[in-house]
Amino acid sequence: MSHSSDNYDHLLRSNLNRVFNERDPAKRAEAIAELFVEVPVMFEPTNVVNGRAEISRVAGDLLQQFGPDFVFVPVGTAVGHHGLAHLSWQAGPKDGPIAVTGADVAEIVDGRIARLWVLLNAAA
């Protein structure tokens, strides 16, 4: 697989849309199996999440916590090279104000996310 920025953009956008916006646990697990290495690690500001099942659980818990209209939206295009990629995003109710902004930074190994850092911007 080529390691172009286009692939990084597709991978990180797919992570937002198919993992962190997916309310169906089976579809989310299928996406994680496709997008992540066998034993991924996700670093949140206050937590380290190990493995596909735990990443799925955390994503599902977030969606449940924030309600049925909460959505993550990519901002711009992911950029990256040499196995490191970055995608900015914003989140909040579909038709409401932006509740949080941040970025995902991922270590990409063989076309899949190996490690994912979730970075939150300070509240405005």
Image: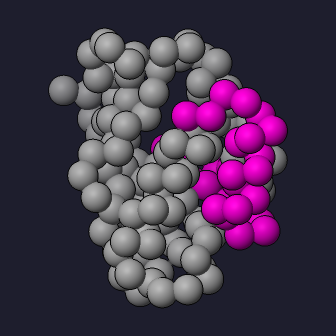
Residue at (52% x, 53% y) in the render = 14
Quadrant the C terminus occupies: top left
Q: Is residue 30 magenta?
A: yes
Image position, residue 61 (x, y; %): 67, 26
Image position, residue 104 (x, y; %): 43, 54
Q: Residue furthest left?
A: 124
Magenta stretch bounds: 21-50
Residue 52 in view, yes or no = yes
Figure disc tally: 0
Left or right, 116 with reference to 3? right
Q: Nearer the viewer, residue 104 or 31?
A: 31
Left or right, 4 with reference to 33? left
Residue at (50% x, 62% y) in the render = 11
- Within the image, what quadrant is residue 102 found in? top left
Position of 42 relative to 25 (above/below): below
Q: Nearer the viewer, residue 64 or 24?
A: 24
Q: Is residue 1 magenta?
A: no
Quadrant the N terminus occupies: bottom right
Image position, residue 12 (x, y; %): 47, 58
Residue at (54% x, 75% y) in the render = 108
Q: Nearer the viewer, residue 103 or 121?
A: 103
Left or right, 79 with reference to 9? left
Residue 117 in view, yes or no = no
Q: Nearer the viewer, residue 76 or 49?
A: 76
Image position, residue 6 (x, y; %): 37, 71
Residue at (77% x, 46% y) in the render = 29
Position of 119 relative to 66 (above/below): below
Q: How is the protein colored in the picture?
A: one colour
